[in-house]
Structures are given as structure tokens and as C-alpha cells.
Amino acid sequence: MTATTSAAAPHPDLRIAVVGDPEGRRVTLFREAARSAGLPPVRVVPWADVLHGGAGFRPGEWVRIESPGEDPAADAVLRGGDPTRVEGSGRWYARFVAAAAEVSAAVTAAGAVALDDPGRLAVLFDKRLCHGVLREAGVPVPDSPTSGIGAPPVRGWDDVRALARDAGLHRMFVKLAHGSSASGVLAVETASGGRIRATTSVERDERGRLFNSLRVRSYTRETEIAAIVDALAPDGLHIERWLPKASQDGRSADLRIVVTDGRATHAVLRTSRSPMTNLHLGGARGDLAAARESIARSGGDWAEALEICERAADRFPGALRVGVDLLPLRNWRAFAVGEVNAFGDLLPGLTGLAEGPAAGLDTYGAQIAAIRRRAAAVADPSGPAGSPVSGGTPTGAALRAGPTMPPGAARSAAVPPVAVPRNTALPDPR
């Protein structure tokens, strides 16, 4: 159920459009949040219209881009094949970035306001670029030999082996550079005597084709692991050190922290018996209060954990929301950022942190509140300054520089271009 935004003054003339799946949960929940806040109905621009060149926007609209992941037809166009297949993420990425740039150009041409910059989306959807940006900003991240611009290419399993050896990685995650929902992720462990194990949701059929599965499995023959990696390499691969995470009730634990307009607003603890904590792969919501107690007992700082997530989000100024995967290390005292997700806010029923600026609101209600505050700041630039969610003009993340998309792609006129940091060595944050 979506909480209302009664603390904010009404904006009866605020018009919002969302690019998304008209029947999807994400769009439905966002529209419900706007309705609960007393706003006019949110206009939906279907991804199908965008991908076929028929999308249009109206002057003065605030335009939000939503994930196309729940729309099978859109996914088929973006991926160009069977949506259950693992291969094709590189094609998906190129087409999605191009479509987001077209949306941005159409929004600008119509005199509307873009809430999502395609340059930021391009970096968020490339794990190598995103990792490099975070590392350059001093955000704690796992060690990686494929971080940032200029990282060596990964053409197959032989390259993975060589890069891991040179970086001293015996336990690592091999990820699709443009993957999501743990698609194509392999948690690889090596040991003496040539022993190896890869834990993954990738299923390989007798013809060597790769499919996403809801069952996590292990491969222990290097020839099979190599075949999977070789098949995925053309889409782009990213390698990270597998950091030992904290546990709760014997299950590996991590946190999804939603940062809304620069402030950490929502948190959920995810636990699993496998290295992947994704809920669709057998993960479950854990006890956040107990996790915070574990952090306090260990001498850690919950406020510092949230601040790390806000620093990560700061690298993507102007982003309405991001979902940060925060890894609590084994002793609950230290943290590292695993990933930053452009569309990491689908957490139905989760209300904001009691001590945060979105208490009582779900993730979509918090975004509606942020849009209203942005609109108020535009309408009255001389108004009082405040936090991006709780009031006033945007501060923090909205005023910091961040990364751009690859050369040649269009940018939103609302966000100035800046450079992606160069590749440098990354210290191990353990």
C-alpha cells in the first residue's frame, strides 16, 4: 500500500509522464503513489512506442524512465532474441542506451523536464564503468582488474584466469558487464590441485546454449565453466573479488539501500544460502533490526553505511533514485558497494527508514515527494534550501559532477557533461 505525501503542499498542475510498461508492477505502483499524493494521473508512454519511434512528450511534463524489464515485447526488441537466454546483454545495452538518448532528446525538444539522464544510465548499466567511477570517488568497492575505462578486455576464460592470477583472486565474481537480476553471474572459487567450482543460475543445455534458471547450481569441471564464460564474453565481462560477507542465521547477507534524490530512504536486508541473494533465486528478506544491532555490537556505524550509499549515489547527480547493493563484511564493521542499480527500487510494501526523510512512504511515494520538491524549487528558485527529499532546492548529489555515457550518445540538456575518470589501481577494501 502506498503511503500519502501529505506533508507536501499540493501541486495540482504537476504533470508527470513515465516511460515504462503500462501493465507492469513498477508503473502501477508509481501511478498509485502519484494518485495518493493528489496529483493528476501519470501519463504512461509505453516502451513499445519508444522503440518503434512513436513516443511523444508534452511541454512542462516531468518525464521519468522506468525499467523495460517487465515488458516481454520491449525486451524482445532490445535483446533481439529469446528473453530466457543469457546471451544478448550487449545488444540489449546498446539498444537501451540509444533508446534512452532518444527519449532525452524528445523530452528536451518538447520543452519537458527529464528526470533520468541517459549518460548516467549508460554508466550504471556498465558494471566496469560504474565500478571505476565509484573507485575514483573513494567509495569502498571490491578489488577488480576490469574496472573503469582502459581496463583490459576479457575475451574468454583464458583471460579470466590470467587476470585473476595477476590480481591474486582465488574467489571472484564473473559478471556480465550489462547484466541484471544475477543473470550470467558466476561465483568462482579455485583451490590447489586444480579444484574449481562456479555457482550460478546459468543453465547450459546439450547444444551449449545458456538459459536463465530459477535454480542455483554448481559446476565443478573447468571445461564446463570455460564454455559458459567463453559464450558470455562477447557481451562483455566484469571481474570482482568475492568478499566474505556477514551472515544472519547462517545465511549470507547483504543490503539493498534505495537512495532517493541523494538521500538514503529505504533499506532491506537480503539473505541467502547461495552467493546470490536475489529474491527470485531463493533469497529472502532478513531481519534489518537485528542486522543493525549486529553492526552496533561490532563497533560499526549504521549511519556510515548509509553515508557510503549516498556517496555512491552522488556520482550520478540528477538521478531520481538508485538502488545500492551494500555488502556488510564478515564482522559487520565494514562495508563495500557491490553494485549501483538504476532501477533498484521495486520493493513492494517497504516503507522508508524511520529516521530518514521518507518515513512512512514506499519507494515510489518518496520519489513523488522528491519530484514535487524539485517542481517547487523550479517554480520558486528563491525558496529555502533543504534536502532533496524533505524540501527546498536540490543539494548534495544534484550539485556534484559525475560520469557520462560513451562518446557519440546524446545527453539530457538538464545535466552538464563531465568526464568518466581514468582507470587506476584499486585497493582491496577488506
Image (cartoon, helix red, strand yellow):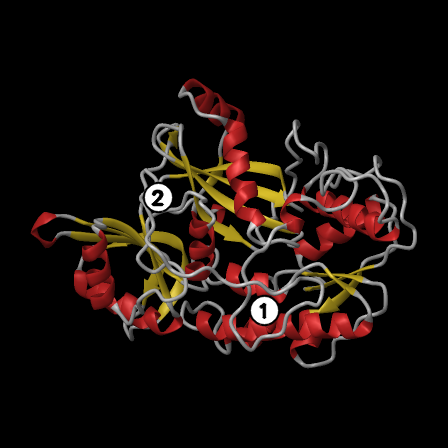
Residue plotted at (37% across, 58% down): 147
For residue 270, above or below residue 340: above
- The residue at the far top in this view is 297
Q: Residue at x 35, y 74 (%)?
A: 234
- Percent x, y for residue 176? 39, 63
> In this orientation, does residue 69 appear?
no
What percent of the width, then of the height, locates residue 41? 85, 56
x%, y% of residue 61?
A: 82, 63
What's the residue type where badge 2 is placed? Answer: Ser
| Dot label at residue 274 | 2
Q: Is residue 142 visible?
A: yes
Q: Nearer the viewer, residue 210 or 195?
A: 195
Front residue of this view, candidates 26 and 338: 338
Can you say whether 155 is above or below 35 in the image?
A: below
Q: Amino acid at mark 1?
A: Pro
Mark 1 nearby-residue class (10 Å; few <14, some 14–19, many ≥20)? few
Foreground of the two, 232 or 243: 243
Q: With 331 as the anchor, is 264 left or right in this view?
A: right
Where residue 306 sits, quadrant-wise, is: top right
Which residue is pictured at 34% across the width and 50% down the height? 426
Identity of the residue furthest to the right in this view: 12
- What mark, if any, has residue 294 been given in the picture? none
Residue shown at the point (48%, 75%) measured from the top left: 91
Instruction: Provide the secondary structure element on which disc 1 rests.
Output: helix
The quadrant of the image that shows the C terminus is: top left
- Marked residue nearer the N-terminal end (2 or 1): 1
Separation of disc 2 and disc 1 at Cα? Answer: 28 Å
**Residue at the disc numbered 1:** 72
Q: Is residue 336 left or right of residue 111?
A: left
Q: Secondary structure at mark 2?
A: loop
**How many C-alpha atoms fall within 10 Å of the one at disc 2: few (<14), some, or many (≥20)?**
some
